[in-house]
Image (cartoon, rainbow, N blue to C red):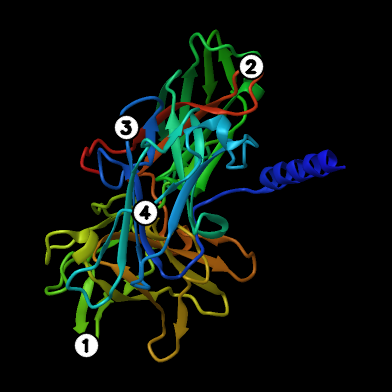
Amino acid sequence: MKGLVFFLSVFLFHLTAYAQQYTDSVYRPSIKSIELYNQGKAGSLPVINLNSGDKLVLGFDDLTGQTSNFYYTLEHCDALWNSSRLAPAEYLQSFTEDQIINYKYSSGTYQKYVHYEIIFPNNNVIPKYAGNYILKVYEDGDQQKLVFTRKLYVLNSRVSVSANVVPSNNVQYRQTNQKLNFTVDYGQLRIQNPATDMRVLVMQNYRSDASVLNREPNTIRGTQLVYNNVNTNDFAGRNEFRYFDMRSLKTGAHGINRIYQDTGFSVQLNTDANRNGQPYEFQFDNNGNFFILNQDGTDPRVDADYARVYFSLDARRSAAEGTPYVIGRFNNFKPDANSTLKFDAASGRFTTMLLLKQGVYDYDYVWMDNATKKADDTVIEGSHFETGNDYQLFIYYRPPGARWEELAGLQQISTTKNQNR
């Protein structure tokens, strides 16, 4: 009987894990300013090469101002961010979790917080396989007390990729869309069926809401898989991101109208206009990214302050038609209750306030239509073929007989030659 109970418990555990899809989420409102990037460059994609010296940096703030017993672990996932249903001992070397013991208290700030930071892989947590991993941070060693999750990638580069961006094949969208064609050469890999052994995810500006999963190639030429179907990987070019510069709370900068100071800092941004239907205008941006920076101090991790940032949008639409949301990588491009703007009858604008740490932030607006219930940022921002965007191609490979998918290739291409983007 005990053996049967154990078997059923393990079966139910794997069944639950299989049904769960992971994403970037925060489960406690006191957790802010989460950064996860390759140690080589702040704000970069959280990707490391398997069995290399590459490191990832994770940093975040807890605005309770009190220290907590935070732990973290990794879970291997497939291309669609479902659990791979592997036991932790299968995909992790050494230990299966580690405590976050590196923290500092904020210094000289109105908003008190504790900044936590870890660098990994380390002696305690080392991924064994390539692929997608979800990073889980939780309290007291109890994964039921989940604090937040973040996606990261472990790469075992085994394929080569060539890609280019062209105007849409659809004449209607040639001025607004960017179409991606690419070829994957799998070389010496054992590929029995390209439709099942290899999948390619194409993503624009690291946005999961702007991604396409390619399940099979359009053409096969020897070891080359060609993806050039006229109807796929056709993305709205969108517009250059809006941005504001809050590196200093003593003087104004781009995008800021006024800065107030009482018991804390308040930043009033310039009112944003609806850009749909306007001609394309180049503007330098960071393709949706954000960077924690502080010109008023020496270490933005602990001396950058928080400010109440007020957004204002002249949407040229009414609240009866829909609702706008402000999104960027700082909130994982999520149109949710935390990013919604409400209509202010007095000003005729949509407004909201977000508590943000000093730095530089890219953002844009998504419109949720009341009739269609669909989110679309081109309604407010417009869309242009000329827009500078970065595209990421994630190539997933399932080895023969394996129960998981590896990340066998990762290629990033830009629609602009500006190397500073």
Q: Nearer the viewer, mark 2 or mark 3?
A: 3
**Residue 400 marker:** 2
Query: Sequence-wise, which precedes: disc 2 or disc 4?
Result: 4
Q: Left or right: where does residue 39 sit relative to residue 167?
A: left
Q: CA distance from mark 2 to mark 3?
A: 28 Å
Residue 332 seen in this snapshot: no
Q: CA distance from mark 4 to mark 3?
A: 33 Å
Please rate how many residues cluster around mark 3, counting C-alpha atoms within 10 Å: few if below 14, some from 14 to 19, many from 20: some
Label 3 is placed on what type of residue? Asp
Label 1 is placed on what type of residue? Asp
- Of the pair 50 and 281, the residue shown nearer to us: 50
Q: Nearer the viewer, mark 4 or mark 3?
A: 3
The quarter of the image holding the N terminus is top right
Label 2 is placed on what type of residue? Pro
Q: CA distance from mark 4 to mark 1?
A: 36 Å
Residue where numbered disc 1 is placed: 262
Q: Residue at x 29, y 60 (%)?
A: 361
Q: Left or right: where does residue 83 sit relative to residue 147?
A: right
Query: Sequence-wise, which precedes: disc 2 or disc 3?
Result: 3
Q: Position of residue 300 (x, y in %)?
A: 20, 60
**Residue 239 marker:** 4
Query: Sequence-wise, which precedes: disc 4 or disc 3?
Result: 3
- Of the pair 270 and 166, the residue shown nearer to us: 270
Q: Residue at x 30, y 47 (%)?
A: 43
Q: Left or right: where does residue 418 sit relative to residue 18?
A: left
- Of the pair 45 and 232, the residue shown nearer to us: 45
